[in-house]
Image: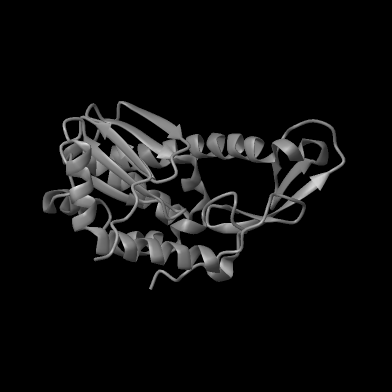
Amino acid sequence: MSQAPVIDRIIRSRRKTVALIVTPEGKLEVRAPLVLGRKQIETIVSEKSGWIKKQQERVHKSNGNALRRPLSNGVNLWFLGASYPLKLTAKAGTRVAFSNGFSLPESALPKAAELLTAWYKARAREIISERVSLYADKSGLKVKSIRITSARTRWGSCSRDNALSFTWRLVMAPIEIIDYIVVHELAHIIEKNHSRAFWNQVEKMQPDYKARRKWLKGNGRLFDLAIEANEANLKSFH
């Protein structure tokens, strides 16, 4: 009998169902209701072990094909679905600049990840807020607030009171994919689940959402500061 997958993290909340998440690093994260005990969670994981291992194998294979390298002069980074080089300059300061490429003072390299993350978060707030307003206005939906997070396993979420959250990594993806996640979370304002009614709402706002969702599943692992941006690695929408 094969060994059950190792649970790397359990997150309990007021949710009603259990979600099994295989992270971009291949770790198993379980999101469970507050009342569910450890043994019950382990039973569910054991029952889904075949699916979990298949997902972990896929992630490890994908990661093996992705070129990982530290942040340094010339490394390519994603922004809105395109790759741009990082150039280290002799200027003083800690400011990230962008003009057909990223530039950063060489003296700030030890804090490159922190500074680039802050830059991405600022761009994410601008771009995602604009896209949310666009689609919310079209659909007559009211959003309580928009928050930009550093989540690694979720592109977005919608709270019970219609507050939306999005990871800053989303602005590494093309605008069409940003729009898909925006529409997905807006649809949760109407349907707080992933029922057929929910997907009908998504399709109503975005008829080609299936192609966008498929593309994100195939390419989403690439959007990270730790992975060299290479447009040749991006899969086609079709």
- At 73% from the left and 34% from the top, the residue drawn is 95
**Position of 231 relative to 189 (above/below):** below
Farthest residue to the bottom: give it: 238
Total count of labels: 0
Residue 140 shows in this picture: no
Which sits in the foreground, 200 or 108? 108
Q: Position of residue 5 (x, y in %)?
A: 32, 55
Q: Position of residue 122 (x, y in %)?
A: 55, 34
Q: Position of residue 43 (x, y in %)?
A: 18, 49
Farthest residue to the right: give it: 90
- At 54% from the left and 51% from the top, the residue drawn is 224
Q: Position of residue 88 (x, y in %)?
A: 80, 46
Farthest residue to the front: give it: 1
Residue 24 shows in this picture: yes
- At 19% from the left and 53% from the top, the residue drawn is 199
As drawn, is 4 to the left or to the right of 27? left
- At 40% from the left and 46% from the top, the residue drawn is 153
Which sits in the foreground, 201 or 53? 53
Which sits in the foreground, 181 or 226? 226
Q: Quadrant of residue 65?
A: bottom right
As drawn, is 196 to the left or to the right of 66? left
Which sits in the foreground, 78 or 208? 78
Q: Quadrant of residue 147?
A: top left
